[in-house]
Image (cartoon, rainbow, N blue to C red):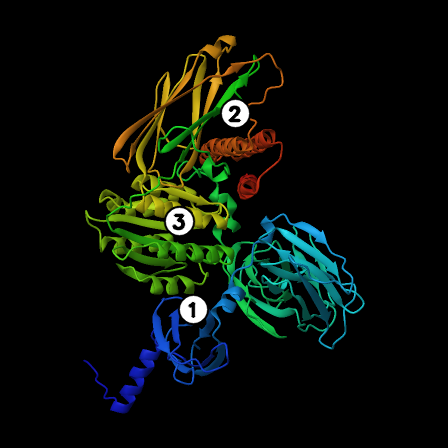
Amino acid sequence: MKLFVMIPTPVRLSLLLLFLWMLPGAHAQGVLNFHLTVYDANQQPKANCPVVIIETSSFKRKEFKTDQEGKLKIVLDEGKQWTANIGAMRNHNLLNVPESGVSNASAVATYDPERWKQLNTPPPNRSSIDFDEIIQRLPYNARPDANNELLEIAVVSEYGKVYGGMDVALVCAATATKYTATTDHEGIARFKIPLNQEYQIDLDGEEDFEQHKVGDKPFKRRITLTYTTIRFKETINKAGYIEQSFQDPLKPISNRVLVGVQVMGGPNNGKGEDIYLEMTYSNKKYHGTTNQEGMVYFLLPKKHAYRVNFNYQDGAGVIDLTRFYGIGNMNTGFMYVPEERLQYPERFLPTKKDVPSLDINDFVSKTYPDTEDDELINVHVKWGSNKINSSSKEAILEIGFSVKEPEEKKSLSKPLNIVFVLDKSGSMAGENIDVLKSAMFHFIERLRPQDHVALIFFDTEAVIAYESKAVNQKILKDIVGAAQASGGTSIYEGLKLGYQEVSKHSDDQSVDRLILLTDGYGSKPVEEVLELSANYFKKGLTISTIGVGTSYNAALLTLLSQYSGGAEHHAIESDKIPLALDKEFESLLYPLASNLKVKVKYNNKIIYKTLYGAPEFSNTNSAVTFKLSKIYSSFNKMALLKFKLENADKDIEKEKISIQVSYFDEQKQEQIEIVRETQLEWTEETDVEMLYDQDMKNAYSIAVINQSLKVIADLCDSENYKAARDQLNETIKSLKKITNEKYTDEMIPVLEMIKDYMRGLDQALKNQAGMK
């Protein structure tokens, strides 16, 4: 028996609406009414000024223009956050759409692109500059001269009190010079500074309080800066983080913003969690601990952005104070989602399947000079030390390659079919995303009308920001400029969309390339990513990869590039991202040479052991062969060959080693052959080192690390963590011996990686002990 109940129409309609409201994503979207007024430099209304807004998650784009009064009203009832470009002033406003209800916002803008660019150009990264300090003690009646401006900086409180005895500095990154002075009893510090330079003004140790640009005329100028000395305690802990102690009631001051941070999630559900803030483009960093409500407060210098990290999460978000004006405070919150790699380092120890392999060339600053011959490729051969004695057990041979720039480069006539798959996860926040945007702008400017391009951005999810079609440089730049770093790292989803896009215009008349850039690990296993990629590789698609930092999945990126025949780039520091993209562009559009083959023939006095910096192709009793990928104009590469010396004596000088190089010159369309010869020199000296050159020491150190990680991977696979730890300790000792503990900046991230592995091995040993 079935029972039917008649429900009145109005009731049925109400129930239907209630059901629809309960569906995921069915809640009513809030509305933002944004009112904008734009004036020109003369404070006259700027009519017909183009305004473009881009949603920072979906990258949906809308175009508007101001009316005759310079006004514009934008109603947003979709998306979450939009960034607004006013003419050439990129990212002038961030517009947040409420989840529900109606909110109103307004802004007044003066259209001055040059001033906007000056204010929003990321500051130089001082942590990598060694400044020359020039102390200035000028009298009150000092005057400018033909080459120098006289600048007086007056420092006063918000109540007009002058600050005497305060340290003031003018910092010029372009000349790596820091001018310092102290304010007198009138609160004035005086400087004579060179013309045509830009300076950052530091007050009382606070960086970049204001900026000052000196023109080409030697004027006398005065700047008055309002400043409030801090009335709280700042100390630096053992790890180098600034910790703040507050006694007075918390309130913002003229040069600091009171920032309240709410932490949600994490191992302790936000309570008692350590939070770390890294000031971008600086080596300053702050540490705090949340209270029982999950809150922590900082008084942070304005005009800077701060990357937010936790013990088990890198790049949880950014506190952006770059556009904070006046005196005030802000409250913000971050979801603490522990990363398995950081929380459980023992789960990410190297294994045979994913042992990382670092490229020695990423740690070499050497640029090879041109050779005297007229060939396209320069071939350089030298020993780490060409002298050996009876105690010598090993010898290292360096073979270097560079390219002579042809007077006229012939560009590839085929159209490019490129898809960028770019990481915008939280760990890319700060300098990484800024440098990526700048590098992408440059790449986009070089694309041709016949080329096709697509943009995929990924964080926790992946999105097609610009579907594969002909190049529109303005729209592409708008989209790249709108990217905001946040969320996780979904490499698999990014590649999946990328493969779909590259297939749209793939044919025999195009050059198909997918460019993947990431600084992290994806959630999918390597095997699944390779399985997804295999069919596309069979069709001729090549992937070039750019790994940023040292915490990315190096094994995955290596396999993707090697299996597909693409190039593998590493950007240990973010400033190497533009170089990687430049190399990629040159290889795509201006291939100079291909099929470069190197055959090294050696004698029976030495025994070949290992090749570093290039994949070995073949190895016989008397010769080793390797090949290199396509050669482009900025090509500069080193390979090292390690030989064991077997019963070496003075006769070794008679035995020459031959280096035979062949390649196909794409510009001349002909095959080229080059031969170099070298030999070792016998000496009776006792103090003979194997390596004298710093670049070779760096490269050999990386080779030692790569070899050691393979051994450690085998030991970790068999769960012999104690032996793995002993091996890592021996590696550290070897590095100290090779470098005399003098490490270059490029080596620092690698040393941090070794420390991470050591922590993982320590934890693995603890886990083993606990199971017994």
Query: Disc 2 marks which residue?
Result: 384
Distance from the alpha carbon under mark 3 to that under mark 1: 24 Å
Relative image position of residue 436 (x, y in whole percent): 44, 55
Farthest right residue in view: 185
Q: For this rendering, which residue is in front, 90 or 521? A: 90
Disc 3 is placed on an element classified as helix
Question: Mark on residue 7?
Answer: none
Could you tell me how far apart the alpha carbons at marks 2 and 1 are, in whole angstroms? 52 Å
In the displayed orientation, state which residue is furthest to the front. Answer: 146
Does residue 669 appear to the left or right of 634 in the view shown?
A: left
Residue on which disc 3 sits: 581
Q: Of discs 2 and 1, which sits in the foreground?
A: 1
**Place of residue 246 in the rendered image (x, y in percent of width and height, measured from the top left):** 72, 67
Secondary structure found at label 2: loop
Q: Nearer the viewer, residue 532 or 14?
A: 532
Q: What residue is shown at x 37% (from left), y 16% (from top)?
A: 622
How would you rate the neighbour count of disc 3 (Cα within 10 Å): few for under 14, some for 14-19, many for 20 or more?
A: many
Q: Quadrant of residue 310?
A: bottom right
Residue that carries the numbered disc 1 in the rendered image: 88
Compared across the picture, whether 453 is left or right of 151 comes to left
Closer mark to the observer between disc 3 and disc 1: 1
